[in-house]
Image (cartoon, helix red, strand yellow):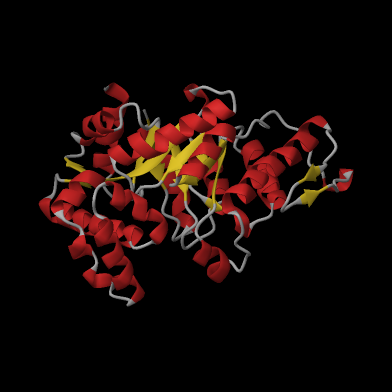
Amino acid sequence: MKIDANLLVDDLNEIPASVRFADEAGFDGVWTFETAHEPFLPLVLAAEHSQRLSLGTCIAVAFARSPAVLAYTAWDLARFSKGRFILGIGTQVKGHNERRFGVKWEKPVEKIREVILAVRAFWDCWQNGARLNFQGEFFKLTLMTPFFSPAPHNYHRIPIYLAGVNRRICQLAGELCDGFHAHPLHTARYLQEKILPNVEIGLARGGRHRQAIELSSSIFVIPTDDPTQAAKYELEVRQQIAFYASTPVYRPVFELEGWGAVADELKAKAARGQWNDMPSLISGEMLDKFALRGTWRELPKKVLKKYDGLLDRASYYFPVVPDRDEAGWRVTVAGFKHV
């Protein structure tokens, strides 16, 4: 299993140090996120200040950008990083698309299928000289003149990872994509019973095998070396689980484990703005299903045992930050490399 690092992008000035540490410590890749900051810009710095790490978005919101914008951005990052870039995209949910990004929400699975195919049509045009003639329900793309066409390069086989939770998006990833970002709010049972079978359906539909796709996820962990710090990690994990579970699209994860009523209660509290009351609804049993607890040295074996056959690459949910827990990170990475 590959072990990746999540990057915190509050300050772009910190990216070079974070990435140099991740590269030197032995991580396999780094991921950025579309939360409070734009996800692509930090990867320019990451490419400049690392030598071997894969560099990807987990995720960029697809519908907030046209297929052309995604294609150009990925093309340049792939070239600049010498083939280390991974384009990770997702639909996000209706509320964020309409009320945060101001874009229309319509048939998300069908639309993101077109995004993937349209992006690849641009790449085929630029690399191979194919005529741009994408005709879909949502996008009709037929104009590409030499002035607007970037030059071919040696790193044009750009992996696309798709993120999702539910049945049809998993199937689409299996059919078309190089990777799948499983949401951090998962249990091993949810991956085994809901994610993997649907990815397999998609693989069969596309005439592909399991080796054709990498399954990746951020996972909740609670390092216990320092009891005071462990308590802080636990509270943060409870808060994050409660936040995710309050969103209707993630309710099936709770429902599968018999906690649908708790998800409904969390949704109601979120609607009333009672954010501080929500973590207490995450029981110890729930925490054990969603998170792994152990010392930095113990965690790799626990991760590998829980996710054997389920994930191909993993990252701890909390980010790698310069001068914070560096010894612990080194122990964890070494554990993944030597098991």
Quadrant location of the N terminus in the rendered image: top left
Please name the residue shown 39% across and 60% down the image. Answer: 248
How far across and how far down the image is residue 95, in percent? 50, 66
User: Would you say residue 221 is visible in this rendering?
Assistant: no
Percent position of residue 116, x then y: 64, 42
Report the front residue among 155 and 87: 87
- Residue at image position (56%, 23%) is 208
Kindly give the residue lying farthest to the bottom in the view shown: 272
Q: Which residue is drawn at 32% across and 58% down?
A: 245
Q: Which of 74 and 273 is in front in this view?
A: 273
Find residue 191 and report its horizontal and vertical position in percent. Answer: 35, 38
Residue 88 relative to residue 241: left or right: right
| Left or right: 131, with 221 as reference point | right
Taking the spot 80% from the left edge, 48% from the top edge, the residue there is: 141
Q: Quadrant of residue 316?
A: top left
In this rendering, the answer to whether 89 lies above or below 299 is below
